[in-house]
C-alpha cells in the first residue's frame, strides 16, 4: 500500500512496505549508506544513513534515526539536510576513514567506489587522524578475486552475501570490535559458485576482479553495452565493457524478474573466451591459407550457389543467425545439429510449455514448496539455484506479520525464523549444491527418478497414498517443480503440475534446458544431427557456431568423411574447424546483435558491444552478404537487422515477439554507450598516437556508439551506463529502480507460451527414455576462458 510522507518539504508517494532509506532513494534523494543492500535487507550496523524524522506537524524537535531501520508512517516528515543529521553522517565517514589507505589513485575501484561517493556526499574533505593505521595481510582467494583487506570499512556486506544469501561456508569474519578480518581461515580459492559477486557487493575495493586487473581501464574510459550471458539457458542480463576493441569485464545488469543483483561465476568470468587463445580471428582454407573477410565471404557465396547445401544450426548461435542459414539452404535442408537426446528433450519442453506455460526465476524465488527432479540446478542453471535457495530461506510472511517484523529487517527476520524453512525436496542422481538446505534428499537413477515422479503425481490425486512430498505440495499455495534430464522425466514432472492444478494448487513448472538458445533453436527446427547424416552425403555442409564432434563424435566423423565440402562458421577453434575445407571467422555474442529465448520463454535481446578495427563479421551479416553474392533472393530483403526480424516473424509466427522486443529508437535519442567523462586524454594507444579514431557507427543498434545522447534521466529503461550525479558505483542502480524495472531492452519484456492450453491434460510416454550423452555442467565456450581454466586447476590441487 502506498502512503504519503514529506521528504525535504516535498510530499512523495512511497511504498509502505519499504524502509525509509529505500523510499528516499526511490524519491531521488541522496542519503549515504554502507551496510544496506536491497537484496540483503537492513541490519543498521554502519550508522551512515542518519536522517531526522518529525512525527506530525506539531513536532519541531525531531529525532535522528537510521533510515534503513525505520518503518514509514503516514504524515511522517523527513529532513536529510538537517544540521545535526549532516554532522552525524560526516562524523561516521571520518571514523570509517581512519584506517582506510590513501590509495584511491592506484585502486582499481577508484572512480566507481561507493565509499568515495558517500564521502563526497557527506561533505567530508579533510582527514584529522594522524596516527598509526591498522593493517592486515591479504589472502590468495583464487583466480577470480584479489584480496585487499586494508581497504575494509567493516560493513559486513560480504559475509552477509556469501554466507546468508549464497550459502557459502568457507568465508567469514574473524576477530572482534575494531579489529576484524573478512576472509577464509586460510588462503585458498573461494568455493561458492557465486563468489564473484563480492566484487560488486563490497562498497570499497577489498575484493577486486582479478582478470580485469590484467587489462584494467577506468570506468569512464570503457564502453558499456547491455547484453545477455551466453553460458546457460537462464540468460542473465549483463553489461559488457570494452576499450580499444578488447572486452575488459562483465558486470551484472539489474533485472528485477530474472537475475536481480547477482550473477554466477561462470557468467561473470566465462566471457574470457572472447579474448582467449582459442578465439578464431582469421578465416582460412582447408590447407591453412589465411583469407580476408571479403575473400571468405566470396568462397562461402560459391558454396551457396548450389542447391545441394545442408545447414547445421546451433543452440549457442542467435535466432537471427540460425534463421538466416535456414532460409539460404532451405527449411528442408536445415538441421538443429544437436544430439538425439537433446532433440527429444527440447521437443518435449516446447510441447509442455505450450500446454502448461513456464515458470520464471521470480516464481522460483517466491515459491513456498519446491521439488527438484533430475539434475543439480547449480550445474545447469546456477542463477535459478540461487533463487531456489532464497525461497527456502524466506521466512513465511505469516510469522513476520504476527510479530510485526518488516520483510526488510534482515536481523529480526533471521531470529524469528527458528529454522522454519519452506520445504525443498531434491531427487537427483548426484550430490547437489541444494542438498544442505533440503528438507529431504533422495538419490536415484534416471529411470528411478521418473518412476518416483509418477508415484508423486498419483499420490497427489489419491490422498490414501501417504507421501511427505505430495502432502507438502498439496498444502502449498505456489509450489514449483524444477525438472531436467530426459524427455520422459520432463513429462513426468509436468504431470505432477497437472495433478496439483486438478486439486486447485497453482503449481508452476521450470524446465532446465542445456544451452543459451536451446528453446529458440527448437522453435526454428529441432531435427538432430543424426537426421542430417544421410542427406549430407556428397553435399556441401555449412556448420554454424557448432562443434558437432563435441556433440556426437561418431556421427560427426562419419559425416565429415562423406561430405563434399565442410564449411564452418565460428568464433572459436573447435575439433570441427580442424576438419573444415573452409573455416570462416565470425563475431561472438559480444561482437554481434541477436536474440536468445531463455528457459522461461523470455525473449532476450543483446547488442553489439565490441568494435574492433579488423573485426570478424556477425554470422547473420556474413550469411546475408554471401547470399546476395550467390543471387539468393531472400538475402536481398535483409538489408537491416530490423528487416531480418520482420522476415523471421513472418516465416515463424511463434517468434513474432522478437520484433516486439527489439526497440526502435530515433538516432537523435539513442542512449550513449560511452560515459560522459570518456575522453581521448587517456588514449589506450597514446604511445603510438595521442588521438583516437572516431567511434564506429552501428545503425542496427538502438544505442549510440558515442558520448552523445539524451541525459540519463530522459533515457528509457535501455540505460547502457547506469549513473546518477554523485553515484558513480554500481549502487547507482538503486536510483533507477522505478524506471529500469525488469526491462533490459527498453521495451516491455516479451515472453512466449503466454496462453497455455492444457491445464488438465496429462502427458503420455513417460517411460520412453533416450540414452544420455551429456557432459553435465560443462559449457563449451566458458571452459575456454583463462580464468575458468585457472579456477579448475586451483580446485583440483586444493
Image (cartoon, grey):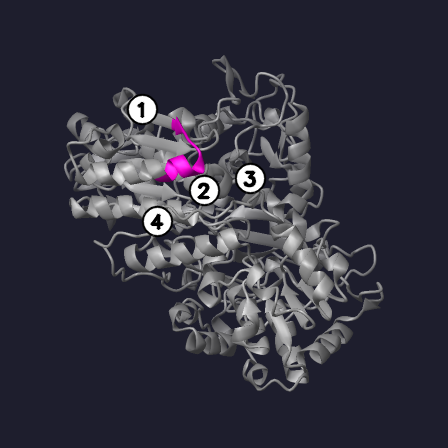
Q: Which residue is mark 1?
A: 414
Q: Which residue is mark 2?
A: 383
Helix, strand or loop at disc 2?
A: helix
Instruction: State the CA–CA distance, disc 3 to disc 4.
Output: 31 Å
Q: Is residue 389 visible?
A: yes
Instruction: State the CA–CA distance, disc 3 to disc 1.
Output: 27 Å
Q: Are marks 2 and 1 in contact (CB under 8 Å)?
A: no
Whichever of labels 4 and 1 marks the residue nearer the N terminus, that label is 1
Whichever of labels 2 and 1 marks the residue nearer the N terminus, that label is 2
Mark 4 vs mark 1, foreground winner is 4
Q: Which residue is mark 4?
A: 491
Instruction: State the CA–CA distance, disc 4 to disc 1.
Output: 38 Å
Number of residues whose C-alpha sits closer than 10 Å to that of mark 3, classed few (under 14), some (14–19) or many (20 or more) = some
Q: Which residue is mark 3?
A: 265
Q: Nearer the viewer, residue 769 or 668?
A: 769
Q: Are marks 4 and 1 in contact (CB under 8 Å)?
A: no
Give yes or no for residue 329 being in the magenta stretch.
no
Mark 2 vs mark 1, foreground winner is 2
Q: Are marks 3 and 4 in contact (CB under 8 Å)?
A: no
Give yes or no for residue 448 being in the magenta stretch.
yes
Number of residues whose C-alpha sits closer than 10 Å to that of mark 2, classed few (under 14), some (14–19) or many (20 or more) = many
* Residue at x-position 32% and y-position 42%: 481
Q: Position of residue 678 (x, y in %)?
A: 62, 57
Amino acid at each position: 500500500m502506498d502512503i504519503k510522507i514529506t521528504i525535504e518539504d516535498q510530499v512523495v508517494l512511497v511504498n509502505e512496505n519499504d524502509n525509509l532509506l529505500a523510499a528516499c532513494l526511490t524519491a531521488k534523494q541522496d542519503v549515504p549508506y554502507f551496510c544496506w543492500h536491497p537484496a540483503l535487507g537492513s541490519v543498521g550496523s554502519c550508522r551512515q544513513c542518519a536522517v531526522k524524522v518529525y512525527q506530525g506537524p506539531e513536532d519541531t524537535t525531531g529525532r535522528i534515526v537510521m533510515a534503513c531501520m525505520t518503518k514509514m508512517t503516514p504524515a511522517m516528515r523527513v529532513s536529510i539536510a538537517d544540521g545535526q543529521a549532516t554532522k552525524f553522517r560526516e562524523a561516521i565517514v571520518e571514523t570509517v576513514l581512519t584506517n582506510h589507505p590513501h590509495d584511491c589513485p592506484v585502486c582499481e575501484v577508484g572512480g566507481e567506489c561507493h565509499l568515495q561517493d558517500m564521502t563526497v556526499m557527506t561533505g567530508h574533505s579533510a582527514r584529522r587522524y594522524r596516527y598509526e593505521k591498522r593493517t592486515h595481510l591479504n589472502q590468495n582467494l583464487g583466480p577470480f578475486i584479489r584480496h585487499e583487506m586494508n581497504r575494509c570499512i567493516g560493513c559486513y556486506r560480504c559475509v552477509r552475501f556469501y554466507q546468508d544469501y549464497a550459502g557459502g561456508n568457507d568465508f567469514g569474519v574473524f576477530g572482534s570490535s575494531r579489529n576484524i578480518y573478512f576472509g577464509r581461515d586460510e588462503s585458498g580459492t573461494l568455493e561458492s559458485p557465486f563468489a564473484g559477486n563480492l566484487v560488486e557487493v563490497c562498497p570499497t575495493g577489498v575484493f577486486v576482479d582479478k582478470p580485469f586487473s590484467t587489462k584494467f581501464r577506468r570506468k569512464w574510459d570503457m564502453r558499456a553495452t547491455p547484453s545477455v550471458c551466453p553460458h546457460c539457458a537462464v540468460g542473465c542480463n549483463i553489461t559488457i565493457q570494452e576499450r580499444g576493441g578488447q572486452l575488459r569485464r562483465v558486470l551484472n545488469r539489474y533485472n528485477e524478474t530474472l537475475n536481480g543483483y547477482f550473477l554466477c561465476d561462470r557468467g561473470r568470468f566465462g566471457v574470457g573466451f572472447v579474448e582467449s587463445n582459442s578465439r578464431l580471428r582469421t578465416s582460412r582454407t582447408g590447407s591453412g591459407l589465411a583469407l580476408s573477410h571479403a575473400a571468405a565471404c566470396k568462397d562461402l557465396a560459391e558454396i551457396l550457389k548450389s542447391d545441394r547445401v545442408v545447414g547445421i544450426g546451433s543452440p549457442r548461435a542467435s535466432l537471427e543467425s540460425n534463421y538466416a542459414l535456414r532460409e539460404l539452404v532451405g527449411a528442408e535442408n536445415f538441421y538443429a545439429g544437436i544430439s538425439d537426446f537433446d532433440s527429444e528433450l527440447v521437443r518435449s519442453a516446447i510441447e509442455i510449455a505450450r500446454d502448461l506455460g513456464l515458470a520464471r526465476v521470480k516464481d522460483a524465488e517466491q515459491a513456498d514448496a519446491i521439488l527438484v527432479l533430475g539434475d543439480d540446478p547449480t550445474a545447469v542453471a546456477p542463477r535459478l539455484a540461487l533463487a531456489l535457495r532464497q525461497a527456502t530461506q524466506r521466512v513465511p510472511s505469516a510469522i513476520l506479520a504476527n510479530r510485526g517484523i518488516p520483510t526488510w529487517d534482515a536481523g529480526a527476520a533471521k531470529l524469528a525464523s527458528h529454522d522454519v524453512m519452506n520445504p525443498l525436496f531434491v531427487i537427483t542422481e548426484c550430490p547437489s549444491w541444494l542438498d544442505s538446505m533440503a528438507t529431504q534428499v533422495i538419490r536415484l537413477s534416471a529411470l528411478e527418478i521418473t518412476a518416483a515422479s509418477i508415484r508423486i503425481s498419483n499420490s497427489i490425486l489419491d490422498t490414501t497414498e501417504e507421501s511427505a512430498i505430495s502432502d507438502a505440495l498439496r498444502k502449498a499455495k505456489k509450489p514449483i517443480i524444477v525438472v531436467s534430464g530426459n524427455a520422459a522425466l520432463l513429462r513426468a514432472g509436468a504431470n505432477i503440475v497437472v495433478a496439483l492444478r486438478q486439486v486447485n494448487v497453482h503449481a508452476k513448472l521450470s524446465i532446465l534446458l542445456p544451452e543459451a538458445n536451446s528453446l529458440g533453436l527448437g522453435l526454428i527446427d529441432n531435427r538432430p544431427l543424426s537426421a542430417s547424416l544421410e542427406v549430407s552425403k556428397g553435399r556441401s555442409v555449412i556448420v554454424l557456431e557448432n562443434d558437432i564432434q563435441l556433440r556426437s563424435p561418431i556421427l560427426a566423423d562419419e559425416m565429415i568423411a562423406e561430405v563434399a565440402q565442410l564449411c564452418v562458421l565460428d568464433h572459436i577453434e573447435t575439433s570441427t574447424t580442424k576438419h573444415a575445407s573452409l573455416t570462416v571467422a565470425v563475431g561472438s555474442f559480444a561482437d554481434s546483435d541477436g536474440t536468445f529465448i531463455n528457459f522461461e520463454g523470455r525473449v532476450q535481446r543483446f547488442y553489439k558491444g565490441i568494435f574492433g578495427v579488423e573485426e570478424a563479421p556477425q554470422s547473420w551479416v556474413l550469411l546475408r552478404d554471401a547470399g546476395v553474392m550467390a543471387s539468393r533472393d531472400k538475402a536481398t530483403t535483409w538489408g537491416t537487422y530490423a528487416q531480418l526480424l520482420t522476415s523471421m516473424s513472418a516465416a515463424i509466427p511463434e517468434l513474432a515477439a522478437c520484433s516486439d522486443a527489439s526497440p526502435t529508437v530515433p538516432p537523435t535519442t539513442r542512449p550513449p554507450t560511452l560515459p560522459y567523462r570518456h575522453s581521448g586524454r587517456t588514449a589506450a594507444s597514446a604511445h603510438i598516437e595521442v588521438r583516437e579514431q572516431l567511434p564506429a557507427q552501428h545503425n542496427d543498434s538502438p544505442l549510440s556508439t558515442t558520448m552523445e545522447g539524451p541525459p540519463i534521466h530522459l533515457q528509457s529503461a535501455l540505460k547502457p551506463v547506469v549513473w546518477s550525479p554523485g553515484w558513480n558505483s554500481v549502487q547507482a542502480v538503486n536510483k533507477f529502480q522505478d524506471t529500469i524495472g525488469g526491462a533490459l531492452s527498453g521495451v516491455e519484456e516479451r515472453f512466449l507460451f503466454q496462453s497455455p492450453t492444457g491445464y488438465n491434460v496429462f502427458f503420455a510416454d513417460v517411460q520412453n527414455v533416450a540414452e544420455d550423452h551429456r557432459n553435465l555442467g560443462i559449457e563449451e565456450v566458458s571452459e575456454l576462458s583463462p580464468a575458468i581454466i585457472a579456477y579448475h586447476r586451483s580446485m583440483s590441487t586444493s
